[in-house]
Amino acid sequence: MTTLDRPSLVPTTLPLPDRRLHRPLLATTAAMAALALFSLCAMAFDDRMLLGESVWLKPLKFAVAFTLYCGTLAWLLSFPHRGRRLTWWMGTVFAATGVVDVGFIVLQAARGTFSHFNTQHDTVNDIGQQVFASGVPGLFLANLVIAVTLSWQRVTDRPTSMAIRAGLGIAVFGMALGYTMGFSGKQQTTDAYGHPVTLNGGHTFLHGQPEVRDGVAGMPVTHWSTAGGDLRVAHFAGLHGIQLLIVAAIVLARLAPSIGWLRTERTRTRLIGVLALGYTGVVATLVWQALRTQPVTRPDGETLTALGLVAALTALGVGLVYTLSTRERATGRHAALSATVPPRAPVPPMSR
């Protein structure tokens, strides 16, 4: 028996590295999911309104957003990577800051007043606004450190790693959009009890920037403005692009066995890169649309042209990836075929 014929003593499948979900982020995910359920129940029994929507709608939306994002981060940080201690602490900062900030949103909802941009001078709001003002940068910086730390590493297979890196970058941009809302100008409105409240910012951009912009006309469920440009649309799209890209990487891996040109990791990684660039173009277009005071429900010719251009470039990128994959497969088959054909031996001269 030759060495190649002997059975190997090395197991055919190597043991997977020890992976543990980030516990503070996991606990925050569970708490936010419970808050989402509570807010839904509260909306059914509490009829108080702020800017035409239930006082519990904002806690519900933040709870759903944090459930998705903290769950994604908890899963992401479980992969072995360099700088794990740093990312663990940043994940903990993100989780703790998220609980404090969303807790203030819940407190203000229970009080029947605003959590964001509220300039009322009472003890609870004054303290809460200071905590809120310091917490939002904490969320942004913790996420930024995690994104930078992981952006140069491959934490899992190449397509998913690309989805993680691109998704975190888009999420950082989406979080930064929250600061833009503070420059939309003051608004004069009332709380749930009819008391006047001055807000030093908002999410809706309208021509002339009237005193009341938010809550003038909104879409069902989300209450995104249908009267003017609403930055919450781009903010939402940016924050949750990472989930879409990870799902895309999983779907491509599932399709790979039955679709030949998707079988290599290199091809799927290129596709995720193309999709990430296309998605970034969509988010940028949504920002541009909102700043031009245009509702997301009524895009004009310029917006449609921009979206069409993003779609065309994305399709062109997918076509280029397909062409490269097909060419590489053909080259690989040719090389494999050449390797199986033995070289022709020289013919000896005939003896006399």
Image: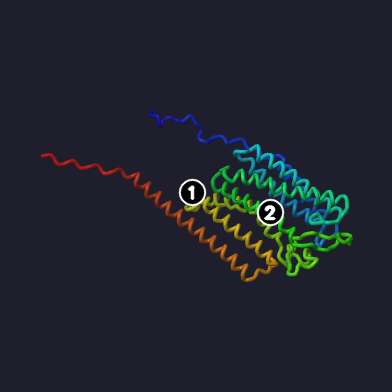
* Element type at mark 2: helix
Residue denoted by label 1: 264
Give how far across and how far down residue 271 sits, in percent.
53, 54
Mark 2 vs mark 1, CA separation in Å: 35 Å
Residue name at image x 85 percent, y 53 percent: 110
Q: Quadrant of residue 222?
A: bottom right
Badge 2 amino acid: Ala
Question: In which quadrant of the rendered view does residue 182 lie?
Answer: bottom right
> Which of the two marks, 2 or 1, is nearer to us in this view?
2
- Horizontal arrangement in the rendering, residue 261 relative to residue 180 (left or right): left
Q: Quadrant of residue 96?
A: top right
Q: x and y percent of residue 76 in the render?
A: 63, 44
Is 237 situated left or right of 334 in this image? right
- At label 2, counting other C-alpha atoms closer than 10 Å, the crowd grade (few under 14, some 14-19, many 20 or more) is some
Residue furthest toward the left? 352
Q: Which numbered marker is on residue 239?
A: none
Specify whether residue 208 is in view: yes
Give me the residue at 58% from left, 66% from top.
Answer: 308
* Side of 273 relative to 325 (left or right): right
Q: Residue furthest bottom?
A: 301
Q: Residue at (56%, 63%) from the top-left corner?
A: 311
Q: Looking at the image, is 185 positioned above or below residue 244?
A: below
Tell me if residue 215 comes above or below residue 71 in the rendering. below
Q: Residues within 10 Å of mark 1 (few under 14, many from 20)?
A: some
Position of residue 125 in the picture relative to residue 307 (left or right): right
The answer to the question of whether label 2 and label 1 lie on touching residues, with beta carbons closer than 8 A, is: no
Q: Nearer the viewer, residue 294 or 78?
A: 294
Q: Earlier in the sequence, mark 2 or mark 1?
A: 2
The amino acid at mark 1 is Thr
Residue highlighted by disc 2: 176
Q: Nearer the viewer, residue 197 or 157?
A: 197
